[in-house]
Amino acid sequence: MLSDIEIKNKLKSFGRLEKDFSDLDLLIENISNKNEEIRFLAITNLAKLGDVKFLNTYKKLIQSEPSSRVRREIASAIGRIRSTKCIPLLFELLKDKDPNIILQSIRGLLVFKDDKEVITKVKRLKRHKNEIIRKVIRTEFPDQGNSDKKNTVEFPEKLKNCIIKGDALKILKKVEDESIHLTFTSPPYYNARDYSIYSSYKEYISLMSEIFKEVHRTTKDGRFLVLNTSPVIMPRAGRKYSSTRYPIPYDIHNELVNMGWEFVDDILWVKPEPSAKNRIAGFEMHRKPLAYKPNCVTEQIMVYRKETTKLIDWVYKQYPEEVLKDSIVDNGYETSNVWHIAPRSSKKHSAIFPIELCDRVINYYSFKGDLIYDPFAGSGSVGKSAIKNERNFFLNELDESYYNDALNDLQKDLFFEKIKTSI
Ligand SMILES: C[S@@+](CC[C@H](N)C(=O)[O-])C[C@H]1O[C@@H](n2cnc3c(N)ncnc32)[C@H](O)[C@@H]1O
């Protein structure tokens, strides 16, 4: 009698199996072994045979098997048989609780793409509650408008190197669908700075949400939105009241995901501690628990992609070879999601981006010649970095004084090309 280790080693040693495989008994004996790993390996090997005579065995096993990992392997084994006899069982498995079993059944059923009933049943999963299943079905059966021939490179000439004074929401309404390659922006920090005032936090979040819905519409398929925000603190209304902290990145995140921005990454922008407001001083004096208030040296850089069924490779294919080559990111790029960058200060604007931060975002998330958008342009840092990195900019800024400063500054950087100021 073989020990568990010997069985495992033997099961691991099998490569490709032919129909006349001589150790079949070892596989059959071990599909019900007490040891989960052995059951898994036995099924993996049995699946290689792709033999329809095991269909009933698989059917019974998948109903009684306690391990999710082994059940998924059984579902995969059923799919690998590639016989129409499996279709009723694969239909059954489409109702499974485990999304991975459903995905295995979909894979098994897609072999029968000419069978109308199969396709109808699979397509119904477009509205399945699991997001990965919905994504797979959308990719397999793209909507008619989602053609491969979309223009992902060019953009309307009127937006090229253009800064417009006014409310981003109103301006965006005049921009055609799928015009923008990348948006990098830092929205107002609710009422924490004096350049914008909202009557409530709810109103602020809903206004931001309206703007980012428009950014979504005007962004090209599968392209990126990079958003810089951070929690803010509103000072106490008086000595008897406590201060209020607003978790802006977390509240905006939910809105973005619900409107079709797919979450890609969270990057932490870390600033040197002396540049942060001193909140710890009180605690340092008394050291009393519950009153601990750390100095906030981070801001979030949240990365989203416009939800699409297209892979990044599809985007690469749309660009000429020389643009792809020219856009390769230089050595010295950041390898972690913690970016240590000192803040930049300005006498004219209280919250401006360091150019290095813009450079990184623009170089990592766009190609040379792309159109980079900032709905909350402030001093125009995104435009400055776009010029420096051989991209084009489209900016909006509500405040007249910030707008004029940004326009003058950018015009100097752009030399002979006259900046557009309307669309
Ligand atoms: C955090 S600052 C952006 C600073 C900018 N990243 C820079 O580097 O200078 C936000 C800016 O958004 C502007 N703003 C606020 N609401 C706006 C709106 N509805 N449309 C356009 N700009 C707006 C404010 O005037 C402010 O300059």
Image (cartoon, grey):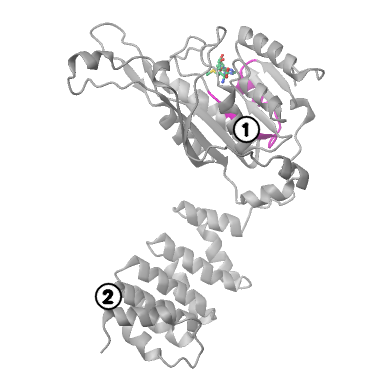
The reply to whether the magenta stretch includes residue 197 is no
**Res 350 label:** none
Find residue 43 and report its horizontal and vertical position in percent: 40, 78
**Res 35 label:** 2
Find residue 18 and report its horizontal and vertical position in percent: 51, 88
> Magenta residues?
166-186
* Figure quadrant, ligand 1: top right
The residue positioned 58% from the left and 20% from the top of the image is 376
Quarter of the image containing the N terminus? bottom left
Q: Amino acid at mark 1?
A: Ile
Reply above or below: 142 against 175: below
355 and 38: which is toward the camera: 355
- 357 relative to 38 in the view: left or right: right
Q: Can you see residue 73?
A: yes
Badge 1 crowding class, 10 Å Cα cut-off, few under 14, some 14 to 19, many 20 or more, is many
Helix, strand or loop at label 1? It is helix
Reply above or below: 88 against 342: below
The residue positioned 60% from the left and 10% from the top of the image is 399
62 and 413: which is toward the camera: 413
Residues at marks 2 and 1 touching, judged by CB atoms closer than 8 Å: no
Q: Which residue is mark 1?
A: 362
- Whole-angstrom CA distance, mark 2 to mark 1, is 52 Å
- 162 relative to 212 in the view: left or right: right
Find residue 338 and report its horizontal and vertical position in percent: 45, 34
